[in-house]
Image: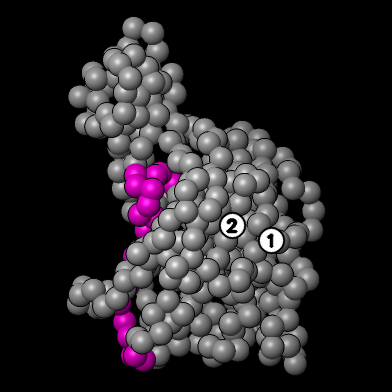
Amino acid sequence: MEKLKGLLRVTKSCFCFCLILACIAPLYATNVQKEFEVFFPWVVSGQFGLISLETAIVVYNPGSETAMVTLESVKADFDGPQSFSLAPAKTNVVFFRGVQVGAVHVKSNVPVTASSYTIDRSALNPLKIISDLTLSGQPLTSKAVLPVFIGTTLADNTALALVYRQGGCYRFTLYDSEGAQVASRTEAFGFNLSRPPSENAAFFVTELFPDVAPGFIGSLVVEHVSPVNIAQSFSVSALYTSDLRLAPASVTPIDTPSQYIVTVKSGGSSTDLAAQYGFTISMSNSSASPVVGVMTEEVARAVARDPRVDSVTIKNVDISDSSTCK
């Protein structure tokens, strides 16, 4: 595992129990009927000890319309333009070279398929491929779960990488194979004032929970817990390490109730919408639009398609005071 730690150093350690948040999150409106987007929280290239890595992101247009694709990088540089058009059935490959560890945000006006492909070679013999790793682009979520292996025949360790759009407190909860909680840790992540996605971080599960003994098999739940009810707070990917080899780990986003701003057209009623779609109105000056409703992303997308609704956007929160995650 020590041989691979350099691959995860996308940021200095964020894990201090008394880390103070002293930042302000910009209030931008993200419409649930937005363009297609996925994230690659872990993009790496270059030589790291005994291995050399090269990553490419492959984008394919399966539809009948031309896709206008944009790649936004976080601490990563790549060959080629940031934006390009992709005709139906066409594929574009973007390469990342040089020594770098970062993340990438892929956006398109129409749905596309996007995956990253990383080749793990021997630094002593570049023709020798140790392993190759394919990761699918991950959506934004506020809660996710992933399988964990530590010191087993399947993997030496489990690593995860986050791109966090919303600053605040994140909880990491480890469960064993029987579903019993083993440990829990809540940490603070800041917010870059430029624009989303702001920052990324990567670490081994054993950095979160150093007391976990070898032979552990279980799962890790990652969730944004404060400020509460914030939709689409982060994106996460994971991988397994065994000596110098890398393997993909599955990550399952969990749709949780979050706050959305619902703007109703003239003549519409937010209370009628809440009754029909089963969401709760948490903030309203009057019966007039807009209102803040608490609902899952699936419900938010259904509400956004209702002809009585003008828009449904994610409600973001200012983090302007200093706070400690416990």
Name the residue tied to disc 2.
Answer: 199
Let me know if residue 34 appears in the view.
no
Q: What amino acid type should be assigned to the residue bearing mark 1? A: Lys
Q: Position of residue 154 (x, y in %)?
A: 41, 86
User: Relative to 310, does residue 41 appear above or below in the rendering?
Assistant: below
Q: Residue at x 39, y 61 (%)?
A: 325
Q: Residue at x 55, y 35 (%)?
A: 28
Let me know if residue 212 appears in the view.
yes
* Among the 4 quarters of the image, the one containing residue 179: bottom left
Q: How far separated are the C-alphas under marks 1 and 2?
A: 9 Å
Q: Is residue 49 left or right of residue 289?
A: right
Q: Secondary structure at mark 1?
A: loop
State which region is magenta. Answer: 213-232
Q: Residue at x 55, y 50 (%)?
A: 23
Q: Secondary structure at mark 2?
A: strand
User: Relative to 177, does residue 14 appear above or below in the rendering?
Assistant: above
Mark 2 is surrounded, within 10 Å at the Cα level, by few (under 14), some (14 to 19) or many (20 or more) other residues, namely many
Mark 1 is surrounded, within 10 Å at the Cα level, by few (under 14), some (14 to 19) or many (20 or more) other residues, namely some
Name the residue tied to disc 1.
Answer: 75
Q: What amino acid type should be assigned to the residue bearing mark 2? A: Glu
Q: Residue at x 34, y 47 (%)?
A: 228
Q: Position of residue 288 (x, y in %)?
A: 34, 14
Q: Is residue 323 left or right of residue 118?
A: left
